[in-house]
Structures are given as C-alpha cells and as structure tokens.
Image (cartoon, coloured by chain):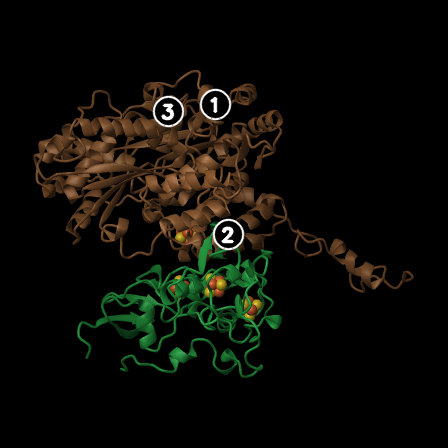
Chain colours: A brown, B green
Amino acid sequence: MKSNLDSVIAQACNKHKNDPGRVIDILWEIQKSLGCINEDAMEKIAATINTSRVHIEGIVSFYSFFSETPKGKIIIRLCGDIVDRHAGIDKIAAVFSEELGIGIGQTSPDRKFSLEYTACIGMSDQAPAALVNEVALTSLTPDSARDIARRLKSSSDPSKLVTVRGDGNNGNHLVNAMVKNNIRMKGEVILADGIQAESGLKKALSKTPLEVIQEIAESGLRGRGGAGFPTGEKWKLAQKAEANRRFVICNADEGEPGTFKDRVLLTERANLIFEGMTIAAYAVGSDSGILYLRAEYAYLLPYLESVMEERRKSGLLGTAICGKKGFDFDIRIQLGAGAYICGEESALISSCEGLRGEPKNRPPFPVEKGYLAKPTIVNNVETFCCAARILDRGSAWFAGIGTKASHGTKLLSISGDCAKPGVYEIPYGVEIAALLEMAGAEDPVIVQVGGASGEMIGRGFFNRKICFSDLPTGGAITIFNSRRNVLAIVDYYLEFFADESCGYCTPCRVGTVFLRERIQKVMHGFAESADLDYLKDLGKTIMMTSRCGLGSSAPKCVLNSMAQFPLVYSSHLKESADGLQPGFNIQKALEESRRIAKRKSMIYDPVFGNENER
Amino acid sequence: MVNNAIVFKIDGVEVRGKPGQTIMHAADEAGIYIPRLCDVEGLEPQGSCRVCTVKINGRTAAACTQPVAPGIEVENDTLEIRNCRRDIVRMLFHEGNHLCPCCEASGRCELQALGYRLGILQPDKYPYLQPVRPVDASHPDIMLDTNRCIRCGRCIRASRHMDHKNVFGYIGRGINKQVGVNGKNLAQTNVHIDDHAVAPGICPVGCIIQKRRGFYDPVGQRRFDLHPIGTEIEKTPKGIKK
Ligand code: SF4
Ligand code: SF4
Ligand code: SF4
Ligand code: FES
C-alpha cells in the first residue's frame, strides 16, 4: 500500500515536471488513484515538488473535490441547487441512500460509493441532476435513480450509465453524455446556424493587433460574465502593459447557481471559443492561453482536448498560426476542483498558478499583473465567442444588434418553474415578462436574474429589461412560482455563499454565517422587527467592507427580498405579549436555575411566596 | 519638499504620500491613525481583516493595500466607517472564543484594544459561534490556541518572509478557514522560540503563546493600559502642518 502511494505520487509529480504551479493537476491524479489525499500523501507531495506540507494541505482543504479522508471509487454528487431541490432531489437522494445503504456525506464501508450534495453542477435545465464521478445524469426520477444505483452496484462503471446520448456534440463519442443542449432560441451572433469557421481569425490576422483591438472597442462589446467591463479597453490595457509575456485566459468556471449556457457553448461552439482566444492572443501579443474548466464539466475535457489537437493539426494553434510568421499561440486546459470563487478572475488566476483559489489584492489588476505576474486578460466563454464573430462580421453589424447602450446578444440560462427551460440567445433589451412568456412560465412570482449573486425581482417589476443600464447579468434566469417560499430561497442562497466564501476576509467569512442565522430565525417565526433592521445593517456592512464580489453581493438576496416582499417578512414576525424576544422562553430558561437554587424566581413566578419552597 | 509628492485628503486634512505608498502608510506618517488588525509594520500587507476600510471618493477600499492617488478624498473617521469597523471587530470576537479576563494577551491584545477604542462595550450584537478547537501544546516552548485566532495571517507572513520557513499556513475555506502548522502539530515543525513568527507583537491576539512567559506585565502597566491603541501613531505626527 505504502509503495503504491509512493509510486502514484512520484508518477503524478513527474508527469507535471514537479512544478508546484501545476499542483492542482497533480492533486487530481492522486485523488483519482488513491481516493483521497491524506497526511502521508501531502507530506510526500510537498517533499517531491519542494514546497511545504501546510501549503498542500491548504490547497486540498480549499477545493471541495479534493478530500483528506478516503472517498468511494464512485462518488455520487447530487446537485443541491434550489431548482433541483424544487424538482425533488431529496427523493433522489433517499433512493440512492436506500439502495447503497449510506447516508448523505457518507462512504460505504467497502469504499465503493460516496454520496453527497454538491453546489449547482450546471444542469438546472434538466433538474434534478447528479454527477457520478464525471458522468452527468439528468432529469432523474426516483425510478431512474433506483435503476442507476442497481446498475452501479453490479457494473461499477459510471460510463455504462449513459444509454441514450444527448443531442448535438453530446453524442460525440468523446463527450458521451446524456445531457441535452436545450437550445430554445438562436440569436444571430453565437448560436446562429452556418457560422463561417475561422473567418474571424483570418480577418483578424490581416489586420494589425491595434486594429483588432479597435474593432472590438468599436463594437461596444462588454464582458458577458456579469461585470460588463468593455472588452476592447481590457485588451488595450493588457497590450500596452510593459512585459515580455502576456496571457489569455478563458473563464469557463460557470458556477453561478442556475447558469449553464457556457456548458452549451463548450459543447457546441468549442472552435468559436478557441478562435476568439486566438484572436485575443494576436491582439494583445500573447503566446499562451488557459481555458479554466470547472471540475463539474470534466466530462467535456477529452472532447475539448481533441478540438485543440485538431486545431494544432490545421495550423490554428501552435507556431505560425494560419501561416502568420511570428504569431505563436497555444492553449492548455486547467481543470478546477470545485470552488465557486474561482469564477472571480483573480481567484481564477490564483487557481491556475496552483494556489488556493483566493482573489488577489487589486490594484494591480490582472491586465497589468495577472497570471505569473504577467499582463493577463481574463474573459468569459461567451465574450470570446462574440469577439470572433465581431472580427468576422464587423463592429457595425454587432453594434446594430441590441439596444443603443448594450450591443449584441446575450445568452440566458432559463430554468425553474417554466415549461421550456434552456438556453436562449436574445438581443439586449428584452423584458423579463417577454422571457417568461417565451419560457412558458405560468404563475411566475419571483425571478432571480443572475443567480445567487444577482437580483431578485418580484411580479411588479417584470417590465425590467436585460441590458447593462437596467439588469446586467451573467445570464441565469431562475423562475419561481407562487408555491415557492421566498425565505427558503434566500436561505438557500445564503447557505451557498457561506459554503463558497473563500474565507479570506472577515465580513464575508463571518457575516454570511450571521446573515443566514438571522434569516432562519425569521423563517422559523422567531424574529421581531428589530431583526429586520439587524439584517439591513449587517448586509450593508458586508457589502461595504468585503474584499471581492462574492462578499459584496451575498447580502443582495436578503436586501432585495426584503424590499420586494415586505409582507412575507412582516407576516413572519412575532410580537410577544411579555415584550421579551419571541424566540426566548423565559420560563424554560429559568427552569435550570430554579432546580439549582431550589426555589422559584421572585420576578417571573407570580405565585412566588404563596407556595412553600421545595 | 518631497519630490513627486502625491497630495490627497483624509477627512479633509491634506496629506502627502509617495508614489506606490499605501493610504495606511501615508496616514501613519502624517500622524493619522487608521485602525487595523492584519497589517503590521514590517510585513507585506494582506488586506484580509477589513478593519482598515476607508471610503475613497465614495467607494470603500482597504487602506492597507490601496495605493495613494493624487486628489483623492479619503473618509476615515466618520460614523459610517466607524460602524463598519465596529461590526467587523464584533464579528471577530464572535467568531472565536474570547474570554479576556483569563487570557494571557489581555492588555496587550490588539483586538481587545480596538474593541475599547471603537467603544464596543457589550459584545452581544451577534450570535456566538463558539468553535471548539484543540489547543496545540506539543512544543516545549510555544503553545497555539487557535480558538482566539482572527486569521490575520501575521504569523504566516512572518514565518515565510522573515524566518524563511513555512511553519504556519492557511487551511480550509469559508468559516472553516484556519491557521494550520506545517506538520502534525507544532512540535513536529521546525519552529523555534526565537523565530519572528512567534515573537510577541506578531500575533495580535492570544493565540501564539510563549510558554513560561505568560502574563507579561502586571495590570496597569500592560501595553494598552499605558496608551490606547493607535495613539503611538497619533502622538508622533510627521505630516505637513498647515
Ligand atoms: S469577499 Fe468572500 S470570497 Fe471575496 S475575498 Fe472576501 S472572503 Fe473571499
Ligand atoms: S485574544 Fe484578545 S480579545 Fe481574545 S480573549 Fe485574549 S485578550 Fe480577549
Ligand atoms: S495565530 Fe495569531 S498571528 Fe496567526 S493568524 Fe491567528 S491571530 Fe493571526
Ligand atoms: S489592516 Fe487592512 S485589511 Fe486588515
């Protein structure tokens, strides 16, 4: 056993040239072979790649897909997202639990199975869903779950669970997934049929890098991840920054609960993404890029690698791209390991460097000092797709789509209480009401725009528009009908943030826990009106003092819901007759001291004095 | 006058900084105290406790990591900012287990001193998380009680950059983020009592304790009995007088 550990570690480290910067890749291999990264392993890895053991422990304990204690050969990760909860993931959990004989969070004694909940796996349009190792299982029912569990027990091969492959490239033998694309609406920019392959790249190479940046700037393209920074400006800053090397990173870490459009792009538009990255590399003068792929989408890894290999063979990656002398660029894929915060660009860079996925201090910004302290542009999957299309069709064409201030189209991931969940490519400026209509939402009451960190919208505001001046969003639209409990939704989002906080800074690390505690107090009917002031206060402090976007958006669901649904909150408040806090039962609290003191309370026992002491 | 001086304002007072200097550093030199916990002289700023939050032209930032810029207006000692800081200091009290009267660090503890300075008299605003973490008393000379740890990382940075060791490091994430040691326990690390990382003044609270040295000074003569926290900066103004 010991020598097995030694050889696995030696092999994994050697494969990545003992490079501490690639420690996440190393840890992945060890986790897969040994089922965990225990103390001995950490010690050994640290010695092999010449770093400290506590550094390795810091990384292992940061990412939720790594484990210090042994996990089963087959890990069943149930999607714990709110949409999956509403779709009945608890029933699926009960079936797995019964069939495998283990509870949630447990590993079977023979170490064959582990069963656990995980954060949104990007399948909200086909909830309830689960990951079995890397295999995504969608639209589960108690019956299908039972069948799956039984088959796993007999075959122990998760890949055998895929009997019907999904549409499009999900059917590709390298993807081999039952996942459906659920593309409901194709806009003209990204999902349109018959996109001219590599035309954008070829046109870009006929221009100077500065002209390419100019084209992007003129198109008005803004980052599709949610923050909406002008892409042309970002590229210009990186291009201007003094350095001998620059990097291009594609953020494919879509972890926002309810988002899955990048999944579809990675499946159906991989070439367009790589084309966009290559154009960016040419524009800023970069020779290497990274696609940061979230661990939940590991099932797409072999396919994406094959697409890159094809591109190398066709001269679209590698040296002298498209015959252009001096333009060399290649891409590697960095697999994440389960941490929502790595979607934040500087945390993503930390993760690429083989560190804990913590955001970095800014300034300096990544465009000046990013990956390995070199100027780096980080753009979203969708942004790179847009960039390639802009170079092909021109900035004027792009600027003609959408609204005056928000150009182009936006991909939305619509899920929740609606008949047609899926991916919609709409021009900017579409109203929420129109989206609800398209998606076949009956009786929508709450729409969460932009996932957990987004904005909660009540019925009175469905005339608001998807665009940068009204509702800028990364793209998640989660619909809730009148049967859903607002407070339970808020509680879920807070649970998510508290779990996913990196813990670096005080207000986010501690404050999210306190917010959740108080929301639960409201939910259980123990709150009084002062608790609402407390929530507002605390929310404001967290937003003002947090170090990155996670902390500063975590309280939004609380503050939004208080503003949009004040009656829900006030109906949960309790005013107690004795003027004491409703959650506090003075008689109960006194019982212990009465017992110890062997007498009653002078104040709180009205019968005091009339009775004999006991 | 200093060349390339960057002139800006803190609470309406004109301050001069140098290019690349942080707001905190420039304020210190000008004799203006900005409360802090994770930042300490001699170590790279980390920007994690957020106690030094200030408003710069209406937007909040950490003074210990934010560079000075010409013409900016910094709000430091305003009610709004004081309230934020109070909340953060309270959070730190409630996150750990703090029983000041029986803590060795009493009187020289920066968290406690900041509580006093900010006027937090009764820490009852937030619920208590009451963690239960084992005390590491394995080492002959040093004890580690992370129940009082505020995750400031001062020990980590001191060990790395001053001692060129990696005795301490962060492990876990979210509310479970903690300070861990580079071994099964302290005794199994190469920590030494003479390391900077374990010297008094690095750990701002009572987590890292030198054995057989506890209760350094008698009550009345302890560090913050003599001067409230921050006054050492306020008493030696080096800034420009108007
Ligand atoms: S706000 Fe939260 S996620 Fe961001 S740095 Fe602070 S603790 Fe980490
Ligand atoms: S560490 Fe400081 S705040 Fe905590 S108990 Fe000791 S003296 Fe009090
Ligand atoms: S042990 Fe002390 S110095 Fe180290 S992080 Fe905790 S509080 Fe800071
Ligand atoms: S002193 Fe600035 S964040 Fe801690």
Beta carbon of the mark 1 residue lies under 8 A of ligand 1: no
The residue labelled by disc 1 is A157
Residue A159: x and y in percent read 44, 22
* Sequence-earlier tag: 3 or 1: 1
* Element type where label 1 sits in the image: loop
The answer to which of A214 and A148 lies nearer the viewer is A148
Query: Callout 2: residue from which chain?
Result: B
Apparent side of residue B121 relative to residue A186 in the rendered image (left or right): right
Q: Secondary structure at mark 3?
A: helix
**Label 3 environment density (alpha carbons within 10 Å; few <14, some 14–19, many ≥20):** some
Residue B26 falls in image quadrant = bottom left
Quadrant including the C terminus of chain B = bottom left
Reading the image, the residue beneath label 3 is A438
Chain under disc 3 = A
For label 2, count other residues whose C-alpha is less than 10 Å away and answer few (under 14), some (14-19) or many (20+): many
Q: Are marks 3 and 2 in contact (CB under 8 Å)?
A: no
What percent of the width, then of the height, locates residue A126?
A: 44, 25
Quadrant in the picture for the N terminus of chain B: bottom left
- Are dots 3 and 1 on a single chain? yes
